[in-house]
Each structure stands twice: as C-alpha cells, then as structure tokens.
Image (cartoon, helix red, strand yellow):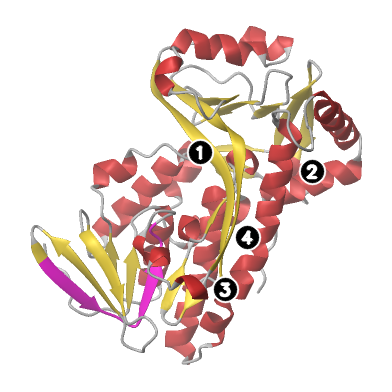
C-alpha cells in the first residue's frame, strides 16, 4: 500500500465523519490521508443510525455522494408518538417550514463515502495498528502507526480525530486540558434488524408502562426495531420470538396488529449515555463526532451531530488554506459545542419523556410515568410544543 509521508490533514477514523471530512476536503483541493484501525468489512458491519436531518442530507449532496441516498432513501415528513394506546402524528414538514428527514442507514452512508474515496484514488490506510498522534501543540504535528509489522509516520498540518468514543485522539490529550461531562442511563436498547415490511410509513416512538419501544426502518422491506431493556440483559437472553412478543405488547392496537415478524439479521444491545468533551481543539488536533460527544439515540442525533462537526471543521480548514486565516479553526470548538449541547438537551429530553425509569432516589416510577403522560398529552395538543419538537428533530440551523 502506498501513501504520502506528508499531507495537509491526517484524518484518524474511517467512519462516516472521517470519510465525509475527507471527501469535503478533497472537493476543496486539500490533500488528506485517512487512517483506520479496523478493516473495511468491520467498519461496514457496524449497525447504527438511520435518520438523517435535512442539513446532513445537504452536506452529503455537497460532498457529491448523495445520488444513491436520494434514489433509495425514504423521505419522511413526520413521526408518530404513541402513548395511552393511541398514536399522535407530529407533522415535521409543516411545523418546521418545509424541512424533512431522510431514512437512510449509516452503513449505506459509509459505503457511499468509501466508494467515492476509492473512485477518487484517495489514500486510506485500513488496519493501521497502534496509531499515535505527536506534537499537535506545534505547527508540525505527526501521526504514526504500524502496518504489517512496519512502523510508519505521516507529517501534516492538522490532525482530525474522528476515531470514536474509544479512539486514541481524545485519549492523547492531557487530562488537565479536557473536561468530560457524562450521564449514563439505567437501561439499554435491544435492537433487531429484520427483512419484513415496516409497521407504519413513519417512525413510531412509544411510551409504555413496560418500557420504551421504537419502530423504525431502513427501507420498505427492512426494519430496525428497538425495545428498552435492562443493562444486565444479554443478547442471548432474547430469542426472536421473545423480542417480537415484547415489542407487540408495547405498541398501540393498530400497530400491534400490523406488525409482521421474521428472523433477525442482527441483534444487539446498546447502553445509553450523554457525553461531551470540552474543548474540541488542542493546538493542531481537532475532535469530531463520537470522539467528542455521544447522545442517546432517542433523538436521532448521533450521525447528524458528527456531520455538523464535519461541516464546521471542513469550512475552517478550507478557510485556512484559501484565505490564510485561522479565524475558523480558532472558533471551531465554540461553534460546534453550541450546537452539540442543544442536541444533547433534545436527546436527553426525548429519552426522559419516553423511557420507563427504575424507582430510586428522586423516584420516577408511577409518578414519573404520569408526568410523562401529562407532558405527552400537552405536547400533541400544543402547536408550540409540536413546533419545538419538530424544529429540533429536523435539525437546528447552523451558525455561519
């Protein structure tokens, strides 16, 4: 494998945030190398988000990778909230001034970005072991890694840490220079992927006394459904039959009757947490995506926030090289965090509104469930409440 010994930007991580940043920089004529510790198949095997904000869709179009998304993705004008045995539709498009969301799996976004990078002949190093970032407080940062038993090094102007929550980039920042904010939720999501038709044309978010449930989809023939579960549960505790029975019990009668079942293609349990690292810039090292923040999936913000970071960071780099100014990179962390905390708040609110919390200090048992029902009842009968939810769900405006 060949790659340059020097480039303008080294991007650590070949998930959607790293690949999207690389594509946008390439479009602007900025050289970059992507390093990834895993294989391409492993990266594509991650089953993640599937709801894209309008601003994320626009950014993928800007990167020149939106053709298949528009051909195969599903445009959704609304979502449904279910509680008390009934469903209530939130008209996202009408309430947000015409904005919509796109249902298109993160795996497909990653595949499109991989294909575009390969077609352009851009250097991507997979299975790069023992990646380390060096001298990022200087004007001559470096990234080293091991490939097939040989140690390599790439010199660069900037390092973009797009290597996820457990990546090396954030871990390389001295502890006294970074602050972590975290809340871990006392439950998880059990998700199942299956080739059956969706229950509804739009996503159903269900608040039920047995726990939260979500009926989502990846296409007109493939679904992604979730039920709230205990953190002590293991995937092997949940047969397909048990999952489908539990999901059906948490849906309104019409959705339960429409539910079609089938063998699972993939099944996994994900813990929920809210996490933010501040700041997101350390000299010539910048954090983006899951390296800097995690949101509960309830608000569908994970991939969209990563794209938001990439939008700000790509423009900052483009401005640096085109206009010879550091104003954009100096302001990157502030701009990104301002939008991140708003999305964190929305995801926290949706999580708090829809899940069953265990009894304990500040008991949110039956009293909490009644409070949730009251707020949901207010929300679906209040134009102001529905508008606020719609504006946040489709994606808040960027600071430009």
* First along the sequence among labels 2 and 1: 1
Q: Which residue sits furthest bottom? A: 324
Q: Can you identify the residue that label 2 sits on?
A: 94
Q: Can you identify the residue that label 1 sits on?
A: 73
- Secondary element under disc 3, as helix, strand or loop, is helix
Tag 2: Cα neighbours inside 10 Å, few (<14), some, or many (≥20)? some
Tag 4: Cα neighbours inside 10 Å, few (<14), some, or many (≥20)? many
* First along the sequence among labels 4 and 3: 3
Q: Which residue sits furthest front? A: 361
Main SS, magenta residues: strand
Q: Quadrant of the C terminus?
A: bottom right
Q: CA distance from mark 4 to mark 3?
A: 10 Å
Q: Is residue 264 above or below residue 110?
A: above
Measured from the top left, where is residue 88 in percent x and y?
80, 26
Measured from the top left, where is residue 247 in percent x and y?
60, 16
Q: Can you identify the residue that label 4 sits on?
A: 340
Q: CA distance from mark 1 to mark 3?
A: 32 Å
Is residue 11 or residue 111 the one in the foreground? 11
* First along the sequence among labels 2 and 4: 2
Q: Can you identify the residue that label 3 sits on?
A: 333
Q: Quadrant of the N terminus?
A: bottom left
As for residue 56 lying within the magenta part, the answer is no
Tag 1: Cα neighbours inside 10 Å, few (<14), some, or many (≥20)? many
* First along the sequence among labels 1 and 3: 1
Measured from the top left, where is residue 77 in percent x and y?
69, 38
* First along the sequence among labels 4 and 1: 1
């Amino acid at each position: 494998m060949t790659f340059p010994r020097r480039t303008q930007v080294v991007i650590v991580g070949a998930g959607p945030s790293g690949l999207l940043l690389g594509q946008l920089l390439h479009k602007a004529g900025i050289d970059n190398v992507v390093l990834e510790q895993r294989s391409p198949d492993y990266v594509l095997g991650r089953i993640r988000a599937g709801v894209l904000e309008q601003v994320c869709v626009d950014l993928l179009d800007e990167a020149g990778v939106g053709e298949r998304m528009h051909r195969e993705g599903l445009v959704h004008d609304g979502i449904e909230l279910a509680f008390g045995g009934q469903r209530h539709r939130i008209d996202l498009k009408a309430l947000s001034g015409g904005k919509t969301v796109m249902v298109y799996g993160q795996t497909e976004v990653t595949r499109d970005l991989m294909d575009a990078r390969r077609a352009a002949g851009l250097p991507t190093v997979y299975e790069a072991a023992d990646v380390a970032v060096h001298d990022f407080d200087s004007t001559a940062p470096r990234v080293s890694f091991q490939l097939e038993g040989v140690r390599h090094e790439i010199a660069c102007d900037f390092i973009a840490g797009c290597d996820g929550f457990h990546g090396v980039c954030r871990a390389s920042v001295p502890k006294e220079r970074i602050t972590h904010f975290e809340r871990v939720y006392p439950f998880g999501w059990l998700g199942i992927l299956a080739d059956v038709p969706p229950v509804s044309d739009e996503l159903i978010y269900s608040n039920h006394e047995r726990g939260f449930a979500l009926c989502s989809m990846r296409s007109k023939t493939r679904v992604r459904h979730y039920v709230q579960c205990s953190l002590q549960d293991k995937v092997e505790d949940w047969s397909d039959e048990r999952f489908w029975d539990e999901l059906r019990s948490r849906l309104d009668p019409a959705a339960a009757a429409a539910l079609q079942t089938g063998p699972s293609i993939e099944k996994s349990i994900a813990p929920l947490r809210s996490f933010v690292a501040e700041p997101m810039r350390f000299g010539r090292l910048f954090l983006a995506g899951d390296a800097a923040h995690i949101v509960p999936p309830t608000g569908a913000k994970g991939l969209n926030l990563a794209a938001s970071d990439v939008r700000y960071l790509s423009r900052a780099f483009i401005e640096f090289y085109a206009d010879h100014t550091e104003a954009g990179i100096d302001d990157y962390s502030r701009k990104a965090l301002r939008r991140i905390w708003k999305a964190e708040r929305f995801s926290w609110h949706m999580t708090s509104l829809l899940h069953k919390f265990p009894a304990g200090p500040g008991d949110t048992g039956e009293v909490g469930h009644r409070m949730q029902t009251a707020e949901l009842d207010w929300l679906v009968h209040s134009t102001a409440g529905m508008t606020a939810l719609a504006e946040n769900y489709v994606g808040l405006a960027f600071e430009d």
